[in-house]
Structures are given as structure tokens and as C-alpha cells.
């Protein structure tokens, strides 16, 4: 009976792990990169400008200039977004939707209001691409559902893995290198067992982030829509509905000043819904402070909301305060655990490493699946067994080496695409997917080991030469960035080089292995 | 205290603690001393290992407070454990040396920073 249970858990672990591992590896690698989304965005964005902090009056003037620009160019957009300069961003960034629903971005000089040329901006999703990729695969709500399904499968794989692993305590610190399948299994076990608390936490908290998407029934049964649910939960007035009646906006800079006073801190971002309508909503988001998250998990920089036409204050989320009672606070703590906005860089590094170990856990699991089947051919799919195993090998290569290649290629694409290109940020993402998609036919055409080392080797090459391509395309050098203390930019390249060295070693090992495997054939 | 100092100290303590716990197991003890530990030795090593892990937790709470510190501690244990597992088969003697040198240095760092 007991062995029967373990046997069925092993089956579940093997097949569930395989099917969802392909997706989960991508989620883990992009999620880990997403930990450093700000640094990556800084690297991908326009060159750093020496920005003096704007005074309160200068911020008001900037918002006035932004409003003037948006009224002229984006009067019919359903929303306006205004990002004030700061945190290394020198420009005033405006976002809106044009007549066909396409997102448009303009950058203004915050002091004069002159539009800055797009070529100076290198428009890019930056690190947000990795964050979005890891929770919705850039595929909207469908992507969120797919990642959710994979995350549940991850929880199942983690727990069934503990059941299957018979010697979890005896082998706690065991790793026996250079012993073939034994070493892969040791590595798989060590990665899983030692980071088990992190993996369980990151999977579960990831699901909790989207509780209202994954478990909509309770809200649908009791509330008209999510908006009404939020009103009831947070005890605040609803968002004003679009009236269809034109009404002039109050001067936004006045609302900014009131909002900053109510928040008790500088604003970072303003969002207007239905500008120009009598039901316009203005939300003012506070800027995080350096000391936020040093001692607490839930970091919240505050939001102040106003009616755009009358200036009536609608609600205030005070910075650092949790609202909505125990259940929502619990959810916020779990979300905070997932997003790691607390504890500064040491915690970000710990999450980055633990996340990559999660990726290693999945990759070693995928490799083990194929290794076991290479050794003893079990005819589990009848006559088609060999070709299905071949397909699984190729999918493993594309899911592990292919996505790694696509991730580093994304950095190269960012530097190589012309800055004047329309919809540049979208192009970057499309090309990222193109690289990933191409890795599959390559893996199908090449013998498995060769496909592995060629893709990993190319990824290694792109990683190692990232500082070079940056120096060639922007004239900025790694050493110069280090010398002026630009840790974000230098850090991105240093980490890329370190990962490149690791991948190069791996590719070299695999290449040697392939040569050894082929020798007997060449002799005859 | 600066989180950077405490995270270095806590990492060293977590590494030393996990090394000590590993040495309480016959396989890893044997890799260094070529024999099995006596029951008393194993118990002593386990107690010392647990103490070092608690000191790592203390270091984390000094740096970040209890709430963030506890999260940091769990992550540090994972990362220190992985470092240990990767080093142990290649250079067990050096792992021992690293743990023996790291733990007192970390404690000194904490005492110096705590004033």
C-alpha cells in the first residue's frame, strides 16, 4: 500500500514535472531576472542624465507642462499617465492611447516642456518585460491562468518530490559529482531540499497575488464587479463612472500639491482616467523612500485619489499603512513576500539566487527524465516511443537553453534595434519570442547533446560580450560605469559576464561529452 | 546595523552552522576524520550547529528587525547550504577551515557593529 502510494507519487512527479517544467523554467528564469527589474530598466533605458531633484514648484510646473502637452496630443485618450523625473530618470514621461488603442509614449524636458526626440530615449519595456513574462507570458489573462496552472503543478511537484525522495535527511548535504545520472539526481535533490522553504513560499504567494483571478466565484456571487468588491473591502467610494459629459479638468498641478501634502511625500506618478470627462479620476502615487522596507515586509508608497473635475478627495491610501482588515493584510504580506521590495539589495540577491536554483531544480529534473530514458528504452508510447522521446529532448533544450538564449538576446536586441523605430518596445518583445521559438527547430534538427551545447554556448557568448556591444553601441564602458558609481548599469553587465562564464563552462563540458560519445563511431 | 554587514556575518554563521550539522553525520565526518563520530561527538556537533544557526538568526534580526530578518534567515540558510553542498565533495578540509574561521569573524563583526 505504502509503496503503491510512493509509486503513484513518482508517476505524478515525473509527468507533471515534465509537462509543466517546460513552462516553469521560463517562469523561474524570467522571474529571477525580474527581481532586478529596476537595474535592468536603467541599463536598457536612455543614458543616465545627471538629474538634480526637482523642487515642489518645479514638479508642479512639470505637471502643468505635461497637461498642456497631453491636452494637445491626447485629448481623446481613455487615460493619461505622467511619470515625474527621479530615481535616475531625467525626463518627464507621458503615456496615453491613440485613436486605434495603441499605447503611445512621449518624453518632455521637465523644466521647459520641450518634447525630447524619441531617438534619445531608447523606448523599451526593460526589466518589466521579465516581470510580465514570468506571470502572464505576455499573453494577458490567458497567460495569468496558464502560469497559475503551472504554479499549482509546481506545488504538486514539490510535495510529491518530498514523498518520492526516500533519503531526504540522510542525503541532506550529499552531492557526488562526476557520477553521471547519480550526480544529476543529487543536484536535483540538493537544489530542491535546501531551497524548499523558498520554492513553496514563492509558488504559493504567487498564486495569492492573483486570488481574485484564480478564485473569482466568491466575488462574482456577492458583488456586482471587482470594483464594488474593492469599495466594500476598503470602505471607500467607487471610481467615478464616465459621464459622457465634457468637463474641464482642474489644474493638475494643484491636485499634485494637495496629493503630495496628503501623502506626506513626493509624487512619482499620476494617472488620469477619462480625462476631460465629468467623471475623470486622478490618482497620485507616492515615491518610495530609501528607508521603506528596511524593517517591514509590506511596502506601500501611498495613493491619493481625486475627482478630476471638482477636485473632491475620493480616497487616500496612506504610505506604509495596510487597509482592508486582516484578510487583505494577510494577502498583502504574501504578495510582499513574493515581490521582495523589503530588505534592500541583500534580500534581492538572495531571491535572485534562490530563484535561479529553482530554475536549476527544474532543468535537472528535465535532464533526468531524458537521461533515464536514454539508458533503458521503455516502450511507454509503443512504436512511437523513440520519436516522442526525441521530441521531449528537443523541448527540454528549447525550454532550458532556448529561453536562456532568448533572455540574453533581449539585452542585445535592446542595443541593436534603431532608437527611432515605431513601437520599439513591442518589437523588442516580439524578437525575444522569435529567438525562443527558433531554438525549437534548431533543437529538433541537431543531435541532442550538440543542440544543448550550441545553444548554451551561444548564450554564453552573448553574455560574455554584453559589455562589448554596449560599449560599441552607446560608447559607455563597464569600467566608466563602475568609476562613476552607476551600480545598476555595471551590475547588469558584471552579472551577465559571471553567468556567461558559467554557461561557457557548461557548454564546454557538454561539447567534450559529445566528442567522447562520438569517438568510437569515427574509429570504425 | 547596516544590512550589508549583518548579511555577511549571518551568511558566515549559517555556513558554519550547516557545516557543523553536516559533520554530525557519519558520511561527512568520515570524509575529514576517516572514522565515524561517537554518539557524544555527534550530539555535541548538532548542538553547536543549532547554536550557530540561532546566532545567524540573531544577526538577521539585528540587521532587519524580526519580520524581515526571519525571511532573510530562511533565504540565507538555503544559499549557505547550497554553497556547502557544492564545496563539500571537492574540498572538505577547506570547508572546515572556512567554517572555523568564518564563525568567530562574523561574531566579532556583529559585536563591533552592535556598539
Image (cartoon, grey):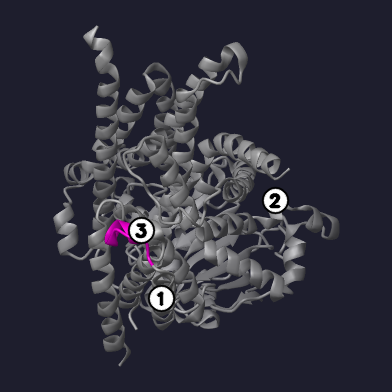
Q: Closer to the camera: disc 1 or disc 2? A: 1
Task: Assess whether residue B34 is covered by the magenta stretch.
Answer: yes
**Is A496 drawn above or below residue B115 in the view shown?**
above
Distance Cα–Cα, label 3 vs label 1: 15 Å
Residue A351: x, y in percent? 43, 60
Q: Tell me the residue at 52%/53% (across/down).
A: A168
Mark 3 lies on a secondary structure that is helix
Q: Nearer the viewer, residue A46 or A138?
A: A138
Which stretch did the figure color magenta? Answer: B29-37
Name the disc covering residue A121, or none. Answer: none
Distance Cα–Cα, label 1 vs label 2: 49 Å
Q: What residue is shown with label 1?
A: B44
Q: Nearer the viewer, residue A100 or A458?
A: A458
Callout 3–callout 2 Cβ contact below 8 Å: no
Task: Assess whether residue A224 is covered by the magenta stretch.
Answer: no
Q: What residue is shown with label 3?
A: B28
Task: State which quarter of the image contains the N terminus of chain B.
Answer: bottom left
Distance Cα–Cα, label 3 vs label 2: 46 Å
Q: Tell me the residue at 27%/44% (across/down).
A: A502
Q: Quadrant of residue A84?
A: bottom left
Q: Tell me the residue at 40%/68% (across/down).
A: B38
Q: What residue is shown with label 2?
A: A214
Q: In the rendered structure, which disc, 3 or 1, sits on the residue that comes first in sequence?
A: 3
**Subunit of mark 3?**
B
Amino acid at each position: 500500500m505504502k509503496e503503491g502510494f510512493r509509486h503513484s507519487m513518482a508517476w505524478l512527479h515525473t509527468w507533471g514535472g515534465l509537462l509543466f517544467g517546460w513552462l516553469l523554467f521560463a517562469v523561474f528564469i524570467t522571474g529571477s531576472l525580474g527581481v532586478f527589474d529596476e537595474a535592468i530598466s536603467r541599463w536598457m533605458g536612455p543614458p543616465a542624465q545627471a538629474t538634480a531633484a526637482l523642487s515642489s514648484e518645479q514638479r508642479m510646473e512639470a505637471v502643468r507642462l505635461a497637461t498642456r502637452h497631453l491636452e494637445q496630443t491626447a485629448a481623446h485618450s481613455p487615460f493619461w499617465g505622467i511619470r515625474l523625473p527621479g530615481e535616475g530618470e531625467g525626463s518627464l514621461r507621458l503615456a496615453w492611447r491613440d485613436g486605434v488603442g495603441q499605447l503611445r509614449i512621449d518624453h518632455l524636458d521637465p523644466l521647459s516642456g520641450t518634447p525630447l526626440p524619441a531617438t534619445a530615449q531608447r523606448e523599451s519595456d526593460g526589466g518589466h518585460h521579465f516581470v510580465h513574462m514570468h506571470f502572464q507570458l505576455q499573453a494577458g489573462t490567458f497567460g495569468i491562468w496558464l502560469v497559475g496552472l503551472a504554479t499549482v503543478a509546481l506545488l504538486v511537484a514539490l510535495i510529491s518530490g518530498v514523498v518520492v525522495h526516500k533519503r531526504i535527511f540522510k542525503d541532506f548535504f550529499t552531492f557526488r559529482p562526476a557520477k553521471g545520472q547519480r550526480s544529476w539526481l543529487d543536484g536535483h535533490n540538493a537544489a530542491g531540499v535546501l531551497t524548499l522553504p523558498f520554492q513553496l513560499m514563492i509558488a504559493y504567494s504567487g498564486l495569492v497575488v492573483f486570488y481574485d483571478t484564480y478564485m473569482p466565484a466568491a466575488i462574482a456571487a456577492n458583488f456586482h464587479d471587482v470594483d464594488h468588491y474593492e469599495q466594500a473591502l476598503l470602505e471607500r467610494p467607487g471610481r467615478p463612472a464616465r459621464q459622457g459629459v465634457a468637463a474641464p479638468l482642474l489644474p493638475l498641478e494643484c491636485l499634485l500639491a494637495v496629493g503630495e501634502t496628503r501623502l506626506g511625500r513626493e509624487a512619482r506618478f499620476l494617472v488620469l482616467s477619462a480625462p476631460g470627462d465629468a467623471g475623470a479620476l486622478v490618482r497620485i502615487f507616492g515615491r518610495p523612500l530609501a528607508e521603506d522596507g528596511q524593517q517591514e515586509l509590506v511596502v506601500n508608497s501611498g495613493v491619493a485619489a481625486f475627482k478630476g473635475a471638482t477636485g473632491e478627495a475620493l480616497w487616500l491610501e496612506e504610505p506604509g499603512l495596510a487597509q482592508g482588515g486582516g484578510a487583505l493584510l494577510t494577502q498583502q504580506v504574501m504578495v510582499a513576500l513574493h515581490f521582495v521590495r523589503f530588505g534592500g539589495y541583500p534580500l534581492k540577491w538572495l531571491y535572485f539566487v534562490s530563484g535561479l536554483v529553482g530554475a536549476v531544480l527544474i532543468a535537472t529534473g528535465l535532464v533526468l527524465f531524458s537521461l533515464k530514458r536514454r539508458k533503458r528504452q521503455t516502450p511507454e508510447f509503443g512504436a512511437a516511443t523513440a520519436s516522442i522521446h526525441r521530441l521531449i529532448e528537443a523541448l527540454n533544450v528549447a525550454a532550458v537553453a532556448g529561453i536562456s538564449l532568448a533572455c540574453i538576446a533581449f539585452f542585445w536586441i535592446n542595443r541593436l534595434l534603431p532608437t527611432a523605430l515605431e513601437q520599439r518596445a513591442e518589437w523588442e518583445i516580439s524578437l525575444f519570442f522569435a529567438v525562443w521559438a527558433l531554438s525549437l527547430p534548431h533543437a529538433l534538427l541537431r543531435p541532442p547533446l550538440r543542440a544543448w551545447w550550441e545553444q548554451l554556448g551561444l548564450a554564453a557568448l552573448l553574455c560574455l560580450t554584453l559589455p562589448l556591444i554596449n560599449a560599441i553601441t552607446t560608447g559607455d564602458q563597464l569600467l566608466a560605469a563602475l568609476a562613476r558609481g552607476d551600480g545598476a548599469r555595471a551590475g547588469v553587465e558584471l552579472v551577465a559576464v559571471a553567468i556567461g562564464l558559467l554557461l561557457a563552462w557548461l557548454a564546454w563540458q557538454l561539447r567534450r561529452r559529445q566528442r567522447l560519445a562520438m569517438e568510437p563511431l569515427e574509429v570504425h | 546595523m547596516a544590512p550589508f554587514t549583518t548579511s555577511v556575518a549571518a551568511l558566515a554563521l549559517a555556513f558554519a552552522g550547516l557545516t557543523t550539522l553536516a559533520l554530525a553525520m557519519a558520511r561527512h565526518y568520515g570524509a575529514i576524520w576517516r572514522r565515524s563520530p561517537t554518539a557524544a561527538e555527534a550530539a555535541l556537533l548538532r548542538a553547536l550547529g543549532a547554536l550557530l544557526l540561532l546566532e545567524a538568526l540573531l544577526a538577521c534580526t539585528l540587521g532587519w528587525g524580526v519580520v524581515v530578518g526571519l525571511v532573510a534567515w530562511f533565504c540565507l540558510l538555503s544559499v549557505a547550504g547550497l554553497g556547502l553542498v557544492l564545496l563539500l565533495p571537492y574540498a572538505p578540509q577547506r570547508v572546515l577551515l572556512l567554517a572555523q574561521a568564518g564563525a568567530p569573524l562574523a561574531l566579532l563583526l556583529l559585536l563591533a557593529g552592535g556598539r
